[in-house]
Image (tube, rainbow, N blue to C red):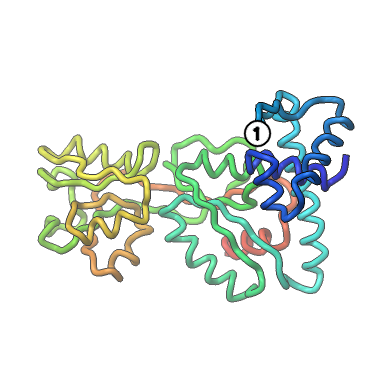
Amino acid sequence: MDARQLKYFLAVVDAGSVHRAAEQLFVAQPSVSQSLRTLERDLGSLLFHRTGRRLVLTAAGHALVAPAREVMRGLELARATVEAVDGLLGGELVIASMPSQSVSPLTDLIAAFAAANPLVRISVRAASTPADVGKMLTTGDAELGVVAASPTAEELPGLEASHLETQRFALLARDEAALPAADPVRPADLAGAALIVGQQGTGMRRVADAVLREAPGSRFAVEVEHREAVLPLVLAGVGIAVVSDSWRALAKAAGACVRALDCPDSLAVSLMHRPGRLSPAAAAFRDLAAG
Protein backbone atom coordinates (compact mmCIF):
# COMPACT_ATOMS: atom_id res chain seq x y z
CA MET A 1 0.00 0.00 0.00
CA ASP A 2 1.34 3.45 -0.87
CA ALA A 3 0.17 7.07 -0.86
CA ARG A 4 -0.63 7.08 -4.58
CA GLN A 5 -2.99 4.13 -4.18
CA LEU A 6 -4.78 5.83 -1.31
CA LYS A 7 -5.00 9.06 -3.30
CA TYR A 8 -6.57 7.22 -6.24
CA PHE A 9 -8.91 5.31 -3.91
CA LEU A 10 -10.20 8.54 -2.34
CA ALA A 11 -10.55 10.15 -5.75
CA VAL A 12 -12.84 7.31 -6.82
CA VAL A 13 -14.81 7.57 -3.57
CA ASP A 14 -15.34 11.32 -4.06
CA ALA A 15 -15.94 11.21 -7.83
CA GLY A 16 -18.18 8.14 -7.80
CA SER A 17 -16.49 6.40 -10.72
CA VAL A 18 -13.08 5.47 -12.06
CA HIS A 19 -13.66 7.50 -15.21
CA ARG A 20 -14.44 10.76 -13.38
CA ALA A 21 -11.64 10.15 -10.88
CA ALA A 22 -9.12 9.71 -13.71
CA GLU A 23 -10.30 12.95 -15.31
CA GLN A 24 -9.90 14.85 -12.04
CA LEU A 25 -6.47 13.32 -11.43
CA PHE A 26 -5.36 13.97 -15.04
CA VAL A 27 -4.24 10.36 -15.44
CA ALA A 28 -5.29 7.50 -17.70
CA GLN A 29 -8.29 5.49 -16.53
CA PRO A 30 -6.38 2.14 -16.62
CA SER A 31 -3.86 3.60 -14.13
CA VAL A 32 -6.62 4.23 -11.60
CA SER A 33 -8.18 0.79 -12.17
CA GLN A 34 -4.81 -0.95 -11.79
CA SER A 35 -4.07 1.01 -8.62
CA LEU A 36 -7.40 -0.07 -7.08
CA ARG A 37 -6.81 -3.72 -7.95
CA THR A 38 -3.33 -3.62 -6.44
CA LEU A 39 -4.65 -1.97 -3.27
CA GLU A 40 -7.40 -4.57 -2.94
CA ARG A 41 -4.87 -7.36 -3.44
CA ASP A 42 -2.53 -5.89 -0.81
CA LEU A 43 -5.39 -5.56 1.70
CA GLY A 44 -6.96 -8.89 0.83
CA SER A 45 -10.43 -7.32 0.60
CA LEU A 46 -12.69 -5.90 -2.07
CA LEU A 47 -13.15 -2.16 -1.61
CA PHE A 48 -15.95 -1.65 -4.15
CA HIS A 49 -18.89 -3.61 -5.45
CA ARG A 50 -18.82 -3.23 -9.21
CA THR A 51 -22.25 -3.01 -10.83
CA GLY A 52 -21.75 -2.11 -14.46
CA ARG A 53 -20.09 1.27 -14.41
CA ARG A 54 -21.19 2.00 -10.85
CA LEU A 55 -18.90 1.51 -7.88
CA VAL A 56 -20.37 1.08 -4.40
CA LEU A 57 -18.16 0.92 -1.33
CA THR A 58 -18.03 -2.39 0.50
CA ALA A 59 -17.81 -2.57 4.29
CA ALA A 60 -14.02 -2.77 3.93
CA GLY A 61 -14.06 0.24 1.63
CA HIS A 62 -16.06 2.28 4.11
CA ALA A 63 -13.59 1.31 6.86
CA LEU A 64 -10.65 2.50 4.75
CA VAL A 65 -11.97 5.99 3.93
CA ALA A 66 -11.22 7.70 7.26
CA PRO A 67 -7.70 6.21 7.70
CA ALA A 68 -6.88 7.03 4.07
CA ARG A 69 -7.94 10.65 4.54
CA GLU A 70 -5.84 10.79 7.71
CA VAL A 71 -2.77 9.54 5.82
CA MET A 72 -3.26 12.06 3.03
CA ARG A 73 -3.81 14.85 5.53
CA GLY A 74 -0.56 13.87 7.29
CA LEU A 75 1.35 14.02 4.02
CA GLU A 76 -0.13 17.40 3.16
CA LEU A 77 0.75 18.66 6.64
CA ALA A 78 4.33 17.45 6.27
CA ARG A 79 4.69 19.15 2.89
CA ALA A 80 3.12 22.39 4.10
CA THR A 81 5.32 22.45 7.21
CA VAL A 82 8.49 22.12 5.16
CA GLU A 83 7.33 24.72 2.64
CA ALA A 84 6.57 27.17 5.47
CA VAL A 85 10.11 27.10 6.87
CA ASP A 86 10.81 30.36 5.03
CA GLY A 87 7.32 31.77 5.58
CA LEU A 88 3.88 31.09 4.11
CA LEU A 89 4.89 31.31 0.46
CA GLY A 90 2.07 29.25 -1.03
CA GLY A 91 -0.24 26.34 -0.38
CA GLU A 92 -3.97 26.14 0.21
CA LEU A 93 -6.17 26.66 3.25
CA VAL A 94 -9.64 25.08 3.12
CA ILE A 95 -12.32 26.52 5.41
CA ALA A 96 -15.88 25.20 5.80
CA SER A 97 -18.39 27.87 6.75
CA MET A 98 -22.09 28.33 7.26
CA PRO A 99 -23.51 30.89 4.78
CA SER A 100 -24.24 33.85 7.05
CA GLN A 101 -20.93 33.55 8.85
CA SER A 102 -19.08 33.55 5.52
CA VAL A 103 -20.39 37.11 5.21
CA SER A 104 -19.21 38.00 8.72
CA PRO A 105 -16.90 37.41 10.52
CA LEU A 106 -15.17 35.26 7.87
CA THR A 107 -14.85 38.02 5.26
CA ASP A 108 -12.86 40.31 7.56
CA LEU A 109 -10.71 37.42 8.81
CA ILE A 110 -9.86 36.34 5.27
CA ALA A 111 -9.06 39.92 4.26
CA ALA A 112 -6.61 40.27 7.15
CA PHE A 113 -5.06 36.86 6.52
CA ALA A 114 -4.70 37.45 2.77
CA ALA A 115 -3.04 40.81 3.38
CA ALA A 116 -0.41 39.12 5.56
CA ASN A 117 -0.11 35.95 3.45
CA PRO A 118 -0.94 36.88 -0.15
CA LEU A 119 0.45 33.66 -1.69
CA VAL A 120 -1.76 31.27 0.28
CA ARG A 121 -4.84 30.24 -1.71
CA ILE A 122 -8.00 30.11 0.40
CA SER A 123 -10.96 27.89 -0.45
CA VAL A 124 -14.26 28.39 1.37
CA ARG A 125 -16.63 25.41 1.26
CA ALA A 126 -20.33 25.86 1.93
CA ALA A 127 -22.03 24.04 4.81
CA SER A 128 -25.65 24.62 5.83
CA THR A 129 -25.52 23.51 9.48
CA PRO A 130 -22.97 22.98 12.27
CA ALA A 131 -23.25 19.23 11.66
CA ASP A 132 -22.27 19.76 8.02
CA VAL A 133 -19.18 21.71 9.09
CA GLY A 134 -18.30 19.00 11.59
CA LYS A 135 -18.56 16.30 8.94
CA MET A 136 -16.27 18.19 6.56
CA LEU A 137 -13.68 18.64 9.31
CA THR A 138 -13.90 14.99 10.37
CA THR A 139 -13.46 13.67 6.83
CA GLY A 140 -10.61 16.08 6.08
CA ASP A 141 -12.51 17.97 3.37
CA ALA A 142 -11.69 21.15 5.30
CA GLU A 143 -9.09 22.01 7.93
CA LEU A 144 -10.94 24.86 9.65
CA GLY A 145 -14.64 25.48 10.10
CA VAL A 146 -16.80 28.46 11.08
CA VAL A 147 -20.04 27.53 12.82
CA ALA A 148 -22.88 29.43 14.47
CA ALA A 149 -25.15 27.74 16.98
CA SER A 150 -27.26 28.49 20.00
CA PRO A 151 -25.07 29.08 23.06
CA THR A 152 -26.84 26.15 24.74
CA ALA A 153 -26.31 23.72 21.84
CA GLU A 154 -24.16 20.65 22.38
CA GLU A 155 -20.58 20.95 21.16
CA LEU A 156 -19.59 19.06 18.03
CA PRO A 157 -17.89 15.86 19.21
CA GLY A 158 -14.21 15.30 18.53
CA LEU A 159 -13.46 18.90 17.56
CA GLU A 160 -11.82 21.87 19.24
CA ALA A 161 -13.51 25.27 19.22
CA SER A 162 -12.43 28.88 19.69
CA HIS A 163 -15.13 31.49 20.29
CA LEU A 164 -15.11 34.30 17.72
CA GLU A 165 -18.16 36.43 18.52
CA THR A 166 -21.82 36.46 19.52
CA GLN A 167 -24.39 37.45 16.92
CA ARG A 168 -27.97 38.53 17.54
CA PHE A 169 -30.79 38.80 15.02
CA ALA A 170 -32.09 41.56 12.78
CA LEU A 171 -34.83 42.33 10.26
CA LEU A 172 -34.24 43.44 6.68
CA ALA A 173 -36.79 45.27 4.56
CA ARG A 174 -36.76 47.16 1.26
CA ASP A 175 -37.52 50.49 2.95
CA GLU A 176 -38.45 51.99 6.31
CA ALA A 177 -42.16 51.91 5.49
CA ALA A 178 -42.09 48.11 5.58
CA LEU A 179 -40.94 47.96 9.22
CA PRO A 180 -42.21 49.41 12.53
CA ALA A 181 -40.42 52.58 13.59
CA ALA A 182 -39.18 51.06 16.86
CA ASP A 183 -35.62 49.75 17.09
CA PRO A 184 -35.48 47.01 18.26
CA VAL A 185 -38.69 45.65 16.77
CA ARG A 186 -40.84 43.36 18.91
CA PRO A 187 -42.04 40.19 17.11
CA ALA A 188 -45.65 41.04 18.02
CA ASP A 189 -45.31 44.29 16.05
CA LEU A 190 -44.81 42.30 12.84
CA ALA A 191 -48.48 41.34 12.62
CA GLY A 192 -49.47 40.52 9.04
CA ALA A 193 -45.87 40.51 7.78
CA ALA A 194 -44.70 38.40 4.86
CA LEU A 195 -41.47 36.75 5.97
CA ILE A 196 -38.47 35.47 4.03
CA VAL A 197 -36.99 32.62 6.05
CA GLY A 198 -34.11 30.17 5.97
CA GLN A 199 -34.23 26.40 5.95
CA GLN A 200 -35.12 24.17 8.88
CA GLY A 201 -32.34 23.50 11.37
CA THR A 202 -30.78 26.98 11.21
CA GLY A 203 -30.79 29.74 13.81
CA MET A 204 -32.47 32.12 11.38
CA ARG A 205 -35.34 29.69 10.89
CA ARG A 206 -35.68 29.07 14.64
CA VAL A 207 -36.14 32.79 15.27
CA ALA A 208 -38.48 33.17 12.28
CA ASP A 209 -40.66 30.39 13.70
CA ALA A 210 -40.85 32.33 16.98
CA VAL A 211 -41.88 35.51 15.10
CA LEU A 212 -44.58 33.57 13.27
CA ARG A 213 -46.03 32.39 16.60
CA GLU A 214 -46.01 35.87 18.16
CA ALA A 215 -47.09 38.03 15.20
CA PRO A 216 -50.80 37.56 14.38
CA GLY A 217 -51.48 37.08 10.69
CA SER A 218 -47.81 36.83 9.71
CA ARG A 219 -46.84 34.20 7.14
CA PHE A 220 -43.84 32.66 5.43
CA ALA A 221 -43.75 34.18 1.96
CA VAL A 222 -40.51 32.49 0.85
CA GLU A 223 -38.46 29.69 2.36
CA VAL A 224 -35.03 29.82 0.75
CA GLU A 225 -32.08 27.47 1.09
CA HIS A 226 -29.82 29.72 -0.98
CA ARG A 227 -28.84 32.33 1.60
CA GLU A 228 -27.40 34.58 -1.13
CA ALA A 229 -30.94 35.05 -2.47
CA VAL A 230 -32.26 36.59 0.77
CA LEU A 231 -31.09 40.17 0.19
CA PRO A 232 -32.22 40.33 -3.47
CA LEU A 233 -35.66 39.07 -2.41
CA VAL A 234 -35.84 41.76 0.27
CA LEU A 235 -34.80 44.51 -2.14
CA ALA A 236 -37.43 43.26 -4.60
CA GLY A 237 -40.09 43.86 -1.94
CA VAL A 238 -41.08 40.20 -1.56
CA GLY A 239 -41.03 40.37 2.24
CA ILE A 240 -39.13 40.98 5.45
CA ALA A 241 -36.14 38.75 6.20
CA VAL A 242 -35.11 37.43 9.60
CA VAL A 243 -31.30 37.24 9.56
CA SER A 244 -28.31 37.19 11.85
CA ASP A 245 -26.35 40.36 12.58
CA SER A 246 -23.69 39.24 10.11
CA TRP A 247 -25.88 40.68 7.33
CA ARG A 248 -26.11 44.23 8.74
CA ALA A 249 -23.25 45.91 6.89
CA LEU A 250 -23.97 44.22 3.56
CA ALA A 251 -27.70 45.00 3.74
CA LYS A 252 -27.13 48.66 4.61
CA ALA A 253 -24.62 49.02 1.79
CA ALA A 254 -27.22 47.62 -0.61
CA GLY A 255 -29.78 50.19 0.55
CA ALA A 256 -31.99 47.93 2.66
CA CYS A 257 -33.59 49.06 5.91
CA VAL A 258 -32.19 47.22 8.96
CA ARG A 259 -33.76 46.94 12.42
CA ALA A 260 -32.66 44.93 15.45
CA LEU A 261 -35.11 42.20 16.48
CA ASP A 262 -36.12 42.16 20.13
CA CYS A 263 -35.67 38.47 20.95
CA PRO A 264 -33.58 36.53 23.47
CA ASP A 265 -31.96 34.25 20.87
CA SER A 266 -28.35 34.64 19.83
CA LEU A 267 -25.68 32.71 17.95
CA ALA A 268 -22.28 31.76 19.32
CA VAL A 269 -19.84 31.86 16.39
CA SER A 270 -16.78 29.62 16.70
CA LEU A 271 -13.74 28.55 14.73
CA MET A 272 -13.48 24.75 14.73
CA HIS A 273 -10.74 22.27 13.89
CA ARG A 274 -9.71 18.73 14.60
CA PRO A 275 -7.40 18.06 17.56
CA GLY A 276 -3.71 17.81 16.79
CA ARG A 277 -1.28 19.78 14.75
CA LEU A 278 -2.57 22.18 12.13
CA SER A 279 -0.88 23.13 8.89
CA PRO A 280 1.15 26.35 9.15
CA ALA A 281 -1.50 28.25 7.17
CA ALA A 282 -4.36 26.98 9.36
CA ALA A 283 -2.39 27.70 12.52
CA ALA A 284 -1.67 31.25 11.33
CA PHE A 285 -5.37 31.78 10.54
CA ARG A 286 -6.41 30.44 13.96
CA ASP A 287 -3.91 32.74 15.70
CA LEU A 288 -5.16 35.73 13.69
CA ALA A 289 -8.76 34.92 14.63
CA ALA A 290 -7.83 34.57 18.29
CA GLY A 291 -6.15 37.97 18.21
Q: Please give the name of the residue rendered at 49% of the width and 42% of the height, measured from the top-left corner.
A: 130
Of the 4 image quadrants, the one containing the C terminus is bottom right
User: Quick one: label 1, few (<14), some, or many (20+) residues within 10 Å?
Assistant: few
| Rendered position, 118 above or below 206 | below
Query: 190 left or right of 103?
Result: left
The quarter of the picture where residue 113 lies is bottom right
Would you name the residue on which mark 1 appears? 53
**Location of residue 122 in the rendering, given as x and y in whole percent from the top left corner:** 60, 63
Is residue 6 or residue 202 the one in the foreground?
A: 6
Of the 4 image quadrants, the one containing the N terminus is top right
Query: 62 left or right of 4?
Result: left
Query: 116 left or right of 185?
Result: right
| Rendered position, 182 above or below 192 | below
Q: Please give the name of the residue rendered at 33% of the width and 44% of the height, measured from the top-left corner.
A: 198
Is residue 122 or residue 242 the one in the foreground?
A: 122
Is residue 12 or residue 61 the one in the foreground?
A: 12
Q: Please give the name of the residue rendered at 20% of the width and 58% of the height, measured from the top-left corner.
A: 173
Query: 114 left or right of 195?
Result: right
Q: Please give the name of the residue rendered at 82% of the width and 25% of the height, measured from the top-left corner.
A: 45
Is residue 209 or residue 226 the one in the foreground?
A: 226
**Location of residue 250 in the rendering, given as x and y in whole percent from the top left corner:** 34, 66
**Location of residue 98 in the rendering, given as x and y in whole percent from the top left corner:** 47, 50
What amino acid type is highlighted by mark number 1? Arg
